[in-house]
Image (cartoon, grey):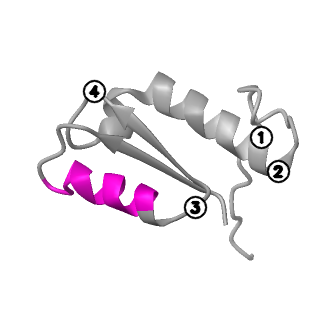
Amino acid sequence: MPTLLIHGKHDQIAGYWESVAYAKQHPNTKLVTLDAGLFAMLVRSETANAELRTFVASVTGTQSALLRGEAASPPVTARRSP
């Protein structure tokens, strides 16, 4: 199963070496290393989002509006019954 790991190289909570070991042991795993610590996907969000879009497109073979970074439909809000 294709797997994407996005990990901050300087993360002191979840050791980066664990992602490296996982990627080596599991075929079809792509490890993206970000120059960040904890919350790497937030700190380096542009890079992380680009990698995620590319990965999803490669796995699904689609280029939906969401994958192209276009705005999605506004969220549907729940309504209370009268």
Mark 4 = which residue? Answer: 35
Q: How far apart are marks 2 and 3 (CA)?
A: 18 Å
Q: Do the residues labelled 3 and 4 touch (CB within 8 Å)?
A: no
Q: What stretch is highlighted in magenta?
A: 13-24
Left or right: where does residue 45 sit relative to residue 13?
A: right
- Secondary structure beneath dot 3 equals loop
Residue 74 visible to the viewer: no
Q: Which amino acid does label 1 sit on?
A: Ala
Between disc 1 and disc 3, whose residue precedes?
3
Position in image of residue 25 (x %, y %): 44, 65
Q: Which of labels 1 and 3 is toward the front?
A: 3
Residue closest to the eye, 22 or 39? 22
Pointer 1: residues within 10 angstroms few (<14), some, or many (20+)?
A: some
Q: Are marks 1 and 2 in contact (CB under 8 Å)?
A: yes
Mark 2 = which residue? Answer: 60
Q: Main secondary structure of the magenta part?
A: helix
Residue 23 appears in which quarter of the rendering? Answer: bottom left
Q: Are marks 1 and 4 in contact (CB under 8 Å)?
A: no
Q: Distance between the residues labelled 2 and 4?
A: 28 Å
Residue closest to the eye, 13 or 21? 21
In which quadrant will I find the N terminus? bottom right
Position in image of residue 11 (x %, y %): 18, 44
Which labelled disc corresponds to residue 27?
A: 3
